Every structure is written in C-alpha cells, then in structure tokens.
Image (spheres, rainbow, N blue to C red):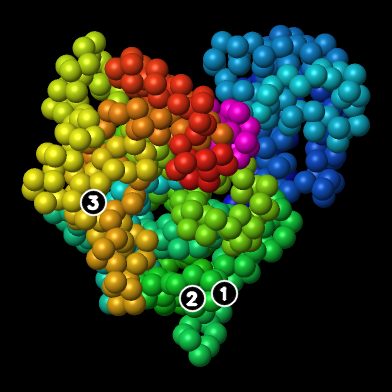
C-alpha cells in the first residue's frame, strides 16, 4: 500500500508482513514463520485500500498500530479478531499505563486506532471493547517561548539565514549540485567559524523557522506553502498565501505586509524577499516555497530535514533555554508565543483566533498558557522573594536574610520613606503592598517603551514605572510590613483565586497558580502574627482592598 506521509514523501507498507508471526520487517520475511492467516490479511488490505474517508497519514498510523496489536496477539497465542483478544489488549494497555511504561495519551491513541480499524472491518466493537472510558485524555498545552528564549533563537536564526543566503546567491550552481556531505559554505557566529554541508537545505530550514515566527503557522501549513503572490498596494507590499488545512478541512490564509491589522517591521519583508529569491533560483517552475536540494535535485522540505537542521544547530551552537536545557526552534512554540503576545496586547479572543485560523474554543484550550517562564517571572516574583524569608525562623533574621540574598529590604512604611527620601529618589508605595526605591529609574523608561508611550506625542517623564507584575524581581523593591500592605497582599491572593473561573478547568488553574498561592500563604504566616491577624480581620470586615475589588482578575 502506497501512502503519502509527508509533503511529497511516500512510504510503502507491505501487508505480507502480517502473514507471518510477530509481523517481521520486510527484509526478514524470508526467515519469518508463516501464520496461515491470509484470508484475514487480504480483507484488511482491501478495506483500508478502498476506504477514502481517511487520509494517508491516518492509514499509516492504523497499519503501524495494527502491527503492535498483531504482535501482542501472537505473543499470547490469541486469535486476531475476537472479544478475548480485544479485552486482553485493553488490559495490557491499562497495566502499562499503571506501571508508567506508557503514557496515557499513547495508550488512548493505540486503543482508539484499533477500535476505529475494527469499525471499518465491520466487527462488533461495542461488544468486544469496554464501554467505559479507560483512559482520560491529558491536555498538554504547548509552552510558548520566554522573551529571553525568543531573543536567543532569533539572534541565531537571522544571522545564519543571511550568511547562507548571501553565499548561495553568489554561486547558486555550486550549492545546487553539491554532494550531501560536501562543504560549500562557511558561517561565522558567536566566535565560531563552521563549514556547512547541504547549505541550501539548511538555509530553507532556517527560513521555515523564521516564517513560523512571523506568521504563527503550523508545521504542515508552512511546509505546504507555495511561492507568495505579490500585490503592489499604495502602502507597500503584501505577501499572501492560502493553504489547505486538511485536518480542519478548510483553507487558512497567511499574509505578511501592511494588512491594516499589525505593523510589520522592514526586516520581515526583507526576509520574505530573500526567501522568494532563493526559492526561484532553486526551482522557478515549481510553485513550492521550501526546498531541500542534493546533487542537483530539488524536492520539498520534509519534517525529517527540519529535525536534522535542528540537531545541527544544537550541536554547533548549543542554544539553551532558561532551564539550561537544549533550546529547539519549533513552529508550534512560535505559534503559541506569537498568539499569546497578541492576545495580551489586544485582549481580543475572537480576533486572535481569526488570525490563527482557529476557533475561540481551540484558542482557549491550547493557546492560553503562554510561557511558563514568563508567567513565573511576572506572577510568582513575590512568592520567590517571600519564600526565602520563610526559611528563617526569627522575623528579624528573615528580614536580614532577604536583604542579603535577594537584595530586598523589609521595612515599616515610615522607615521606608525616611530612608529613601534622604537621597531624593521619590520613593513610592505600589498597588501590591510594597515599596519602590526608584519609581522613576531606568526600569520606568523600559516600561514606557514597553507600553508604547511616545515622548514625541505625549510627555511621559512624570509617569512612574507601573510594571507591577515584575516588581518582586526588581532590585528597587522593598517589602513594607504594615497591616494595610498585608491586607493588600491578601486581596491580591483572592484576586488570583478568583481567576479560576476564567480558566478552562481547575487543572489548568492549579498548574498555573498553585505554587504562587502556596508561597503567598507561607509568606503571610511568616510575618508578625499581630500584623497578620489585624490584616485578616480587616479583610473579613471591610472586604478586599479597593485596589483589588471583586471581579478584578483580568491580569491573570
């Protein structure tokens, strides 16, 4: 059976393998033991081959999962099509999940494949398989990149793409006709000079990663892209492309340019022009955009080429994420990062979902987590600071420990004002019950730029830093130990707890905020008991602090 498993990649599956015990590889068929089940195998082949309701990728998954099922049946000397075998198969998957040797989603997928295949074969699936849901689906939203990780990747991908593009355009025939392991280019980055083989394939793969950053496209959608159509409009160039999204059975449009929705920097349009130029040089007669080239032959880039180039990047440049783990460029993570940032800026679920070619429900389920690193930095900074104070049993000792280890002071409000007013820093209290030593310092300039405050149109010198989600990771932060401030902290905690109703489910909420809430609790119990009791009574008597009233949870 010939199956299309890539952009232009086909695989053949030989059903003769099923005729032998344990489904041996094709090369080992001569040494295999005949199982005398030709009638069943022929029926399987005809049903799958004649079915047009499933894609080739789905069929490819079916035949490989069926091979695992047949091996299991042969191992336990069971009939292939029977209620006993189906029951034993499910019990085997449950046991593997229980022992931890198989992930629950893998077991769920294997069982679902066999059940779907048996339905095609018109076997009594409802009688043979359990009517109960054996495996609970575990939703694992893709993590976005943090700001630092994005900068690390872009500072790697952009220079490499530009260097390879320049060298290829100087002598394209040399690179097109090169052997797979022939070094035809040299890149210089991070103090290293590296000879590059397969320069064209690597350049297109780097272009694919950059395209995923600019467009938020899925891997399959990007790899299926054709050469862009150029439209000369009054405000500049617009590059647009419609691609069929087979799993969703619809077309999605990818546009780059001045489309009246987002400002696109010039380097993005410059990148598109270079990519189109490169694609036309390689093969002007083929509308495909991304190519892998070897020995003068060009073919569409496949996922395997992307993995190979990713491994090359890790081997040569060793980019690390904020957990000091290998940092891989992945289209799905660029997609999450871009959509999360756009959603943060606009707050428009429908508009963000429209730009991504998804429904708002899909956006809520898979693209709302963002970057855990950024979430921890912004929403758990206070907990990290207070956690260190909890480690000390004595209150005064904890304050000194926090000051030394975290460069954070713990002062009463009057002492805070007295100390920092002397040096004319204009200290201020913040909305989260703490103080800032330099509210008009360099951090304020960064905040104004982040919020797009432009001095050309608005005088913003008098505006203090208000980036409250990063206060506890700022060196200007001072913890103020007063009843009012602990009341404010308790109100802040309640606002976080209230945000559970805006999450998909309680599991998502626990994953995002459990650590933060636990650490705030520890911190509250580490302060002077008298201050804590008065703040707690104030919260019960007067309700939440005016800064954190009921319903204020949109920050979370």
Q: Classify mark 2: helix, strand or loop.
A: strand
Residue 12 is situated, as x and y percent measured from the top left of the image, at: 65, 44
Other residues around mark 2 within 10 Å, as few (<14) / some (14–19) / many (≥20): many
Other residues around mark 1 within 10 Å, as few (<14) / some (14–19) / many (≥20): some
Q: Are marks 2 and 1 in contact (CB under 8 Å)?
A: yes
Quarter of the view holding residue 117: top right
In the picture, the disc for residue 240 is 1
Residue beneath the point at 22% across and 61% down: 186
Residue beneath the point at 52% across and 31% down: 543
- Kindly report the secondary structure that dominates the magenta region of the rendered protein: helix
- Residue mark closest to the camera, 3 vs 1: 3
The image shows residue 59, relative to residue 118, as above or below, that is below
Q: Which of marks 3 and 1 is nearer the N terminus?
A: 1
Q: Which of marks 2 and 3 is nearer the N terminus?
A: 2
Q: Residue at the front extreme? A: 541
According to the picture, the residue beneath numbered tag 3 turns out to be 439
Q: Which of marks 2 and 1 is nearer the N terminus?
A: 1
Q: In this view, does 97 lie to the left or right of 35?
A: left
Q: Give the range drawn in magenta.
A: 499-513
Residue 447 is situated, as x and y percent measured from the top left of the image, at: 30, 57
Residue beneath the point at 56% across and 34% down: 498
Measured Cα–Cα span from mark 3 to mark 1: 45 Å
The image shows residue 10, relative to residue 104, as above or below, that is below
Q: Classify mark 1: helix, strand or loop.
A: strand
Q: Can residue 120 be seen in this view?
A: yes
Q: Work out whether residue 22 or residue 233 is closer to the camera in this orientation and state it.
A: 233
Q: Does the magenta stretch include residue 454?
A: no
Q: Work out whether residue 225 or residue 540 is closer to the camera in this orientation and state it.
A: 540
According to the picture, the residue beneath numbered tag 2 turns out to be 257
Residue 253 is situated, as x and y percent measured from the top left of the image, at: 62, 67
């Amino acid at each position: 059976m010939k199956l299309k498993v890539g952009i232009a990649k086909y695989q053949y599956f030989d059903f003769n393998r099923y005729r032998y015990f344990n489904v041996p590889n094709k090369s080992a068929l001569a040494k295999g033991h005949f199982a005398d089940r030709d009638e069943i195998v022929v029926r399987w082949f005809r049903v799958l081959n004649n079915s047009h309701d499933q894609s080739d990728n789905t069929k490819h998954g079916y035949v490989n999962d069926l091979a695992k099922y047949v091996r299991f049946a042969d191992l336990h000397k069971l009939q292939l099509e029977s209620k006993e075998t189906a029951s034993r198969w499910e019990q085997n998957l449950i046991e593997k999940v229980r022992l931890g040797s198989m992930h629950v989603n893998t077991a769920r997928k294997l069982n679902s494949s066999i059940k779907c295949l048996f339905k095609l074969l018109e076997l009594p699936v409802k009688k043979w398989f359990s009517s109960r849901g054996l495996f609970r689906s575990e939703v694992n939203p893709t993590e976005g990149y943090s700001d630092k990780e994005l900068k690390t990747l872009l500072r790697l991908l952009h220079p490499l793409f530009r260097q390879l593009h320049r060298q290829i355009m100087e002598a394209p025939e040399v690179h097109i006709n090169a052997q797979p392991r022939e070094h035809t280019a040299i890149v210089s980055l991070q103090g290293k000079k590296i000879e590059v083989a397969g320069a064209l394939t690597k350049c297109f793969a780097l272009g694919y990663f950059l395209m995923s950053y600019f467009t938020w496209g899925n891997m399959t959608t990007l790899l299926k892209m054709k050469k862009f159509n150029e439209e000369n409009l009054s405000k500049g160039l617009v590059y647009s492309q419609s691609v069929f999204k087979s799993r969703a059975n619809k077309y999605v449009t990818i546009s780059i340019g001045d489309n009246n929705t987002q400002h696109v920097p010039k380097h993005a349009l410059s990148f598109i022009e270079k990519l189109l130029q490169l694609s036309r040089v390689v093969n002007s007669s083929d509308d495909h955009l991304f190519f892998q080239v070897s020995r003068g032959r060009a073919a569409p880039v496949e996922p395997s080429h992307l993995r190979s180039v990713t491994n090359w990047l890790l081997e040569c440049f060793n980019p690390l994420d904020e957990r000091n783990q290998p940092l891989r460029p992945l289209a799905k993570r660029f997609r999450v990062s871009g959509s999360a940032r756009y959603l943060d800026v606009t707050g428009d679920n429908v508009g963000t979902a429209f730009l991504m070619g998804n429904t708002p429900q899909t956006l809520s389920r898979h693209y709302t987590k963002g970057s855990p690193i950024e979430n921890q930095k912004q929403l758990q900074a206070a907990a990290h600071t207070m956690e260190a104070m909890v480690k000390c049993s004595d209150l005064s000792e904890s304050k000194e420990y926090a000051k030394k280890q975290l460069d954070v002071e713990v002062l009463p409000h009057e002492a805070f004002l007295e100390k920092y007013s002397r040096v004319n820093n204009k200290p201020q209290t913040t909305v989260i019950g703490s103080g800032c030593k330099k509210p008009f310092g360099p951090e304020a300039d960064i905040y104004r730029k982040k919020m797009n405050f432009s001095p050309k149109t608005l005088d913003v010198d008098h505006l203090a830093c208000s980036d409250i989600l990063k206060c506890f990771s700022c060196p200007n932060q001072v913890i103020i130990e007063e009843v009012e401030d602990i009341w404010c902290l308790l109100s802040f905690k309640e606002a976080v707890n209230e945000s559970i109703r805006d999450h998909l489910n309680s599991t998502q909420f626990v994953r995002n905020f459990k650590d933060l809430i636990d650490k705030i609790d520890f911190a509250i119990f580490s302060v002077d008991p008298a201050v804590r009791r008065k703040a707690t009574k104030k919260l019960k008597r007067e309700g939440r602090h005016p800064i954190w009233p009921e319903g204020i949870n949109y920050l979370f």
